[in-house]
Amino acid sequence: VVEAIRTRRLNKAAQALAAAPPGLKIAAVARTHGFAAADSFSRAFKARFGLTPREAREHGGTLWARDGCDDAAESEVMANWLRTLRA
């Protein structure tokens, strides 16, 4: 259960980063999504997606803006998209 909640928070944070205005701090996104410390958020984000939050934000996130995705499909789309950025 704990891991499912953490995964959901990371997925929502990734969506927020993709849609964030340029000046929004990553630490603010982390706090908004339940991470008290930016460094622990960054480690968890990189472990989940293979990119740092900064790298993910710099690449944008047009796939995350799709309407009508359920959380499981959305999660898989995001994870796959981030993996392609690493390659």
Image: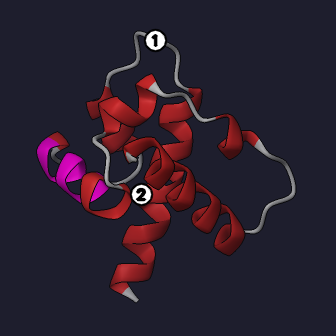
Q: Amino acid at mark 2?
A: Leu
Residue located beneath label 2 in the image: 10
Q: Residue at x 42, y 23 (%)?
A: 58
Q: Residue furthest bottom?
A: 1
Residue located beneath label 1 in the image: 22
Residue 42, placed above or below residue 58: below
SS at mark 2 in the image = helix
Q: Residue furthest top?
A: 23
SS at mark 1 in the image = loop
Query: Does the magenta run of residues contain 43?
Result: yes
Q: Is residue 65 left or right of residue 40?
A: right
Q: Residue at x 26, y 33 (%)?
A: 27
Q: Which numbered tag is attached to residue 44?
A: none
Q: Quadrant of residue 85?
A: top left
Q: Residue at x 43, y 29 (%)?
A: 57
Query: Which quarter of the figure is the N terminus placed in?
Result: bottom left
Q: Residue at x 46, y 11 (%)?
A: 22
Which of 86/33 is in front? 86
Give the percent coordinates (x, y) of residue 67.
85, 49
| Sequence order check, earlier mark of 1 and 2 | 2
Q: Amino acid at mark 1?
A: Pro
User: Looking at the magenta stretch, what is its main secondary structure?
Assistant: helix
Q: Which residues are magenta?
A: 39-45
Which of 7/54 is in front? 54
Give the percent coordinates (x, y) of residue 34.
34, 54
Q: Residues within 10 Å of mark 1 (few under 14, many from 20)?
A: few
